[in-house]
Image (cartoon, rainbow, N blue to C red):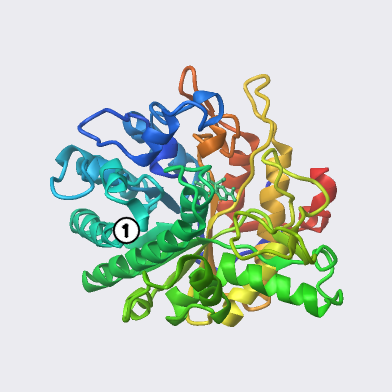
Amino acid sequence: TTVVAKGRTLRFPEGFVWGAATAAYQIEGAARQDGRGVSIWDTFSRTPGRVADGHTGDVACDHYNRHRDDVRLMRDLGLRAYRFSVAWPRVLPEGAGRVNEAGLAFYDRLVDDLLEAGIAPYATLYHWDLPQALEDAGGWTSRETAYRFAEYAEVVRDRLGDRVKTWLTVNEPWVAAVLGYGIGVHAPGRASAADAFRATHHMLLAHGLAARLLREAGAAEIAITLNLAPVLTPEGLHDPQAPVSAEDAEAVNRIDCLLNRQFLDPALRGEYPREVLEIVERIAGLGHVRDGDLKLIHQPVDLLGINYYTPCVVRARPGAPGSDSYPGSDGIEFSGATGPTTATGWPIVPTALTRLLTRLSRDYPEVGLLVTENGAAFEDVVAGGRVADADRIAFIEGHLRAAYAAIEEGADLRGYLVWSLLDNFEWAEGYHKRFGIVHVDFATQRRLPKDSALWYRDVIARNGLVKDRARRPTLEVVA
Ligand code: PNW
């Protein structure tokens, strides 16, 4: 709460979009209210053993019934944008066909409330809550699901498109395909590498179909949101100049292709990397990739949404089995970065965000960049009516410094959305991992802005960071 003179601020570009993000299943609750249908996450979380301590999103933050209060909270923090997702089974309870008016009406009210509070609504169409009826018909392994998604996108577009100007199609297809269909730790809990590759392709197709029809209706900004991470060797992690052997370079490139370019290249260039095609052909065949698909996937987009949490660290090791999360990664060893980690065990490496953003701007120069998620879970303690989460402040500040450095190096970064506004249902981890800048007491649904929320409010108000603090090495602060 210090007042800072202008000259002492690390100022972000004018119009930089400051905001926060959430997702429907993680916050809404009201799972059986107003005609909402069942999603794969309802089924998955209600299946014993799938989610920590049997937690479900049945109630979550009860945001469905408290959205007015939550929008007021956002306004008090000064958010310029709020990224939420639309629950497909609220809009189309069976996934297709019958439209549920009450579900649409909820998003209608939410958007109006946001606009009234001066907050730009950023709508994500798919954040993992596939209608169960569509899963029963094959889910994302079926090509038909992409066409059902397009029909759903059209319904939402027709209802909200006069007021929602920024649309995000699909959130993190890598996580949804690999964790959901490849290794089964997320819904729908299937475990087949071949299915994961089919799901990936169909989600990309879904993105292309939706982007096209959003464009037809004159949407101002269309984006895909990807979980992206620099792939680095242990030596290269903190030293970009470190020499890399030919074997390590091959390992890095292979994982970069599977994690990043498998999604970036089809969406932004209309092609799969050769390395990806070779692996997919070997594991799943290429029967699911039809003529014309890549042209459909490659729609003009305005923004690339980047969800960044931690880098991916690999090296070549002959004979290593690889990772189930990366089919085709045999001969590669995955190791975490060293140094401090968050409560999810993810190493904290802000410099990797600079490298990611500069690389994306260099390799995909036509698209603007938007950090659609970045944030951290820590062991928060409520004491004296306050959550003194200095570790989260240090995390966010370090990553904003890193983002600023990328902008200085020429990256076309348009904004930053912190994950997350509220503590919420953290998928397979249930409610144990708290990512919010606002604390939620799940017994009473009381919201309490953490110190990080108050700090973020000040960052937004001055459109930047305090310089002196910026000189402090972030990792020391965290440790
Ligand atoms: C992203 N992983 O999920 C999602 O978009 C959010 O819904 C989520 O709450 C947030 O990041 C924090 O986890 C991920 O295991 C979940 O690699 C899991 C992984 C990556 C991203």
Q: Residue at x 47, y 60 (%)?
A: 194
Name the residue furthest left: 98
Q: Nearer the viewer, residue 430 or 475?
A: 430
| Side of 57 where 30 appears, left or right | left
Front in this rendered view, residue 474 or 23: 23
Query: Which quarter of the figure has residue 344?
Result: top right
Residue 458: % across, % down:
60, 47
Amino acid of disc 1: Ser
Residue under numbered circle 1: 142
Q: Is residue 109 visible?
A: no
Q: Is residue 51 left or right of residue 311?
A: left
CA neighbours of label 1 inside 10 A, class few (<14), some (14 to 19), many (20+): some
Quadrant housing residue 104:
top left
Residue at x 37% of width, y 72% of height = 287
In the depicted structure, whether residue 282 falls above or below residue 225: below
- Name the residue located 37 percent from the left edge and 57 percent from the top edge: 141
As displayed, is residue 114 above or below residue 332? Answer: above
